[in-house]
Image: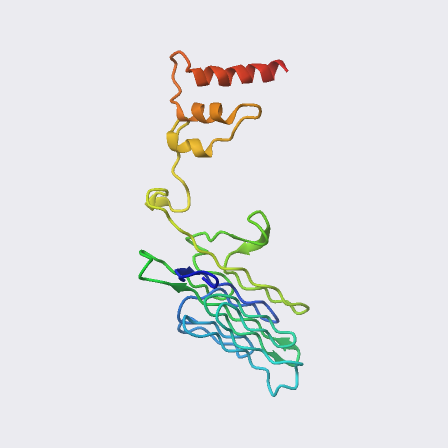
Amino acid sequence: GSSGLETVCVASGGGGGGGRDGQPGGCLDGELPGTKIDQLNGRMGTASAGGKPGDCGEGILADFDAESGQAWQGGCGASFGGGGGGGFFGGGGGGISPGIVGAGGGGSCYVNLETCADVVVMQGEGREPGGVNDRTPPPATGMHELDKVGGPVGLGGEADTHACAPGNHGGVRIYKPGFYNDNDRGKPPPREYGDPVRAKDVMLPIGVPVSSALALAKSNISDDEGTEEEEEFEKYEYEEEQG
């Protein structure tokens, strides 16, 4: 990536919202064919160049004009315009006209086809990210994975007449072979209690040694005499009830 040795896969972020909705994260070639272009909004970035900025008229309406997107970052909006979304190349910043400020363009993604196989890139439309109807994009986060900022990854910022709204960062979903069912991607297959694969998903009971709980999860539960691990587990359960 921007600080690594080789760029393999880059997700695209949504542009900031202004008087218009921000664009969602894009693909490799900018806006989809037939997309209605609002001249005030920044353009979407591509895999080879940043998006162009929105129209700022004669430059007398803003203290500074909107800027084009650059590698790894979106362009600044005009005085009150939404900023462009980040990506391999960022989207352009939003422009300005009397009474209306433009939104930022979405960033572009990138895939190194020499190192990646079976890749699907989903481009959004309007403000919504790609795959929202059938792939269920994960929720966007802030400082950490539990800091939910609202909405899925790749979402463009919402339009507001009083303030600009940030767009959401992009997302890369990696499917490991055999980990998900091909017919039900996104949901792990159901597993019975005692399945060795489920051992990593077990919730450890309070007060029970980790080794004992994991050993119990890996063992097959039967009506026969319990194993040493099961007896130790039951002993802790009994002591907890008595306490």
Front residue (pair 76, 103): 76
The percent position of residue 21, horizontal first and vertical second, equals 56, 68
Residue 202 versus residue 53 in the image, above or below: above
> Residue at position x 53%, y 79% from top?
39
Q: Is residue 58 above or below residue 150?
A: below
**What sort of colour scheme is used for the picture?**
rainbow
Q: Nearer the viewer, residue 48 or 128?
A: 48
Residue placed farthest to the bottom in the image? Answer: 58
**Position of the C terminus by quadrant:** top right
The one of 42 and 178 positioned closer to us in this rendering: 178
- Where is residue 18? Give x, y as percent: 61, 70
- x 33%, y 45%: residue: 177
- Residue pictured at 38% horizontal, 12% vertical: 224
Which quadrant of the view contains residue 8?
Answer: bottom left
* Most distant residue in the front direction: 5
Q: Position of 181 compared to 85: left or right?
A: left
- Identify the image quadrant of residue 190: top left
Q: Give the answer, above or below, for where 167 lies relative to 43.
A: above
Q: Quadrant of the N terminus?
A: bottom left
Residue appearing at x 45%, y 60% in the figure: 4
Q: How many marks?
A: 0
Counting from the top left corner in percent of width and height, residue 9 is at 40, 60
How far across and how far down the image is residue 154, in percent? 50, 60
Question: Against 10, is 100 above or below?
Answer: below
